[in-house]
Image (tube, rainbow, N blue to C red):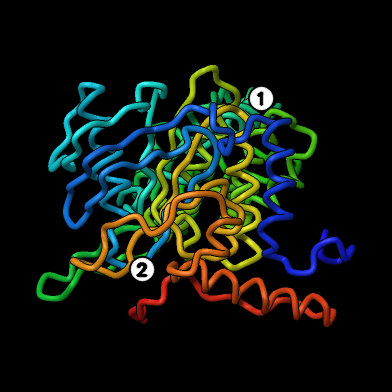
């Protein structure tokens, strides 16, 4: 906005932006403020990391950047997360070697949201993660048709006996053993893939039964349940993290790793306000996201920051890095050539840092984006900040 108003001659005018950020920090207590709490690390020697001293702001969004193999995930997982688990009395294997670590005691809980899948259970679905399935079952059990049949909320669950199809046990599919060939998964012949008994499917709420409701996407359900504020409040986090396109009954085993990350984030957003402060550790949360959806993810993260939580994210996506409050760039290379602090500070300092490959990539990205905006065109799809060749 300042660039368009001709108050900034360059979008990375570090001095002008830094003055504005100092004023903002004084008003809002940003992590750039020198009095803000910090996580202090000293003598980190895990894997290829060789860090004598590092201070990470304990408030705001911190981005860990650098080429692949520079030690970002090691710092996030082995050093920060596993040391927190050991200090909290929980089992932790292969803890990253660190001489001293301070500041983690300020958090009641630390969450590592990595690239691990949610699990192989075909019974788990997005609405069960945000506790919305119970609200839907309560609506159906409250209809006249359900009360006449004396059907409670449990009858509309495919996880327990009662209303589900027992031939497929509520899965909608059956596994056919082929003996000398791989097993084949086929649609259940008794329920035709609808998971429930015919009696249960005769119960409708606003013209739709439980099967038809589970087939709706999150965005469609938000419009369908517009008169139910409690249910909308449960569905809103799924839309906030950009999962409005998934169906309510979709198995979480079919979600990608990036979708699984965002579903975990939505589950925490659905819990609402809490007095406890939590630390979230993300491993490339923008994986698989369109550039437009990165903005949605950042808004969801800012919602957590507004509640007093903190987060550190390993990330290459340049728009995400530009939106961070603090950047720690590791490198300068990978393996033995990495594991050192190239830069640590606000984004404005990274843009003017001559030795940072991430800073150079971010400057080029801002230049291209500014040129396209001045020409009245949409910015092109941008690459990541990682110059290392990526496997297809």
Q: Specify the quadrant of the image occupied by residue 201.
A: top right
Which residue sits at x=74%, y=32%? 228
The picture places residue 1, in percent across and down from the top left corner, at 83, 59
Q: Earlier in the sequence, mark 2 or mark 1?
A: 2
Is 15 positioned to the left or the right of 199 in the image?
right
Give SS at disc 2: loop
Q: Is residue 209 above or below residue 180?
A: above
Provide residue 188's location: percent of width, then percent of height: 39, 58
Q: Which residue is mark 2?
A: 67
Query: Disc 2 to disc 1, how far (Cα)?
Result: 56 Å
Q: Nearer the viewer, mark 2 or mark 1?
A: 2
Residue at image point 68% right, 47% down = 221
Up-down: is 9 above or below 212? below
Instruction: Please state which of residues 134 and 156 is positioned toward the viewer in this rendering.
Output: 134
Residue 134 higher or lower than 189, as above or below: above
Q: Nearer the viewer, residue 140 or 21?
A: 21
Task: Name the mark on residue 142.
Answer: 1
Q: Secondary structure at mark 1?
A: loop
């Amino acid at each position: 906005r300042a660039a368009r108003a001709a108050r900034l001659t360059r979008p990375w005018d570090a001095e002008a932006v830094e003055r504005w950020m100092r004023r903002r920090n004084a008003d809002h207590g940003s992590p750039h403020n020198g009095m803000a709490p910090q996580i202090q690390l000293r003598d980190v020697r895990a894997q290829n990391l060789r860090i004598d001293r590092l201070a990470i702001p304990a408030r705001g969004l911190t981005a860990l950047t650098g080429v692949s193999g520079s030690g970002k995930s090691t710092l996030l997982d082995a050093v920060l997360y596993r040391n927190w688990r050991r200090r909290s009395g929980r089992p932790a294997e292969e803890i990253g070697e660190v001489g001293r670590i301070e500041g983690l005691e300020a958090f009641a809980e630390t969450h590592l949201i990595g690239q691990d899948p949610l699990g192989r259970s075909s019974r788990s679905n997005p609405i069960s993660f945000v506790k919305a399935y119970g609200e839907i079952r309560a609506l159906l059990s409250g209809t006249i048709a359900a009360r006449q049949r004396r059907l409670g909320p449990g009858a509309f669950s495919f996880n327990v006996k009662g209303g589900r199809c027992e031939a497929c046990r509520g899965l909608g599919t059956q596994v056919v053993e082929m003996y000398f060939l791989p097993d084949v998964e086929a649609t259940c012949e008794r329920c035709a893939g609808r998971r429930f008994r015919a009696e249960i499917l005769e119960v409708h709420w606003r013209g739709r039964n439980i099967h038809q409701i589970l087939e709706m996407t999150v965005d469609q359900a938000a419009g369908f349940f517009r008169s139910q504020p409690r249910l909308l409040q449960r569905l809103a986090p799924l839309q906030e993290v950009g999962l409005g396109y998934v169906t309510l009954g979709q198995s979480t085993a079919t979600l990608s790793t990036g979708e699984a990350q965002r579903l975990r984030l939505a589950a925490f957003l659905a819990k609402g306000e809490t007095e406890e402060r939590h630390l979230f550790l993300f491993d490339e949360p923008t994986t698989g996201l369109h550039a437009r959806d990165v903005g949605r993810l950042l808004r969801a993260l800012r919602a957590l920051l507004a509640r007093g939580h903190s987060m550190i994210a390993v990330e290459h996506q340049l728009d995400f890095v530009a939106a961070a409050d603090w950047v720690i760039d590791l490198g300068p290379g990978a393996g033995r050539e990495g594991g050192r602090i190239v830069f640590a500070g606000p984004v404005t300092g990274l843009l003017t840092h001559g030795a940072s490959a991430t800073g150079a990539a971010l400057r080029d990205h801002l230049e291209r984006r500014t040129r396209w905006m001045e020409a009245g065109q949409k910015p092109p799809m941008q690459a990541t900040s990682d110059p290392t060749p990526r496997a297809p």
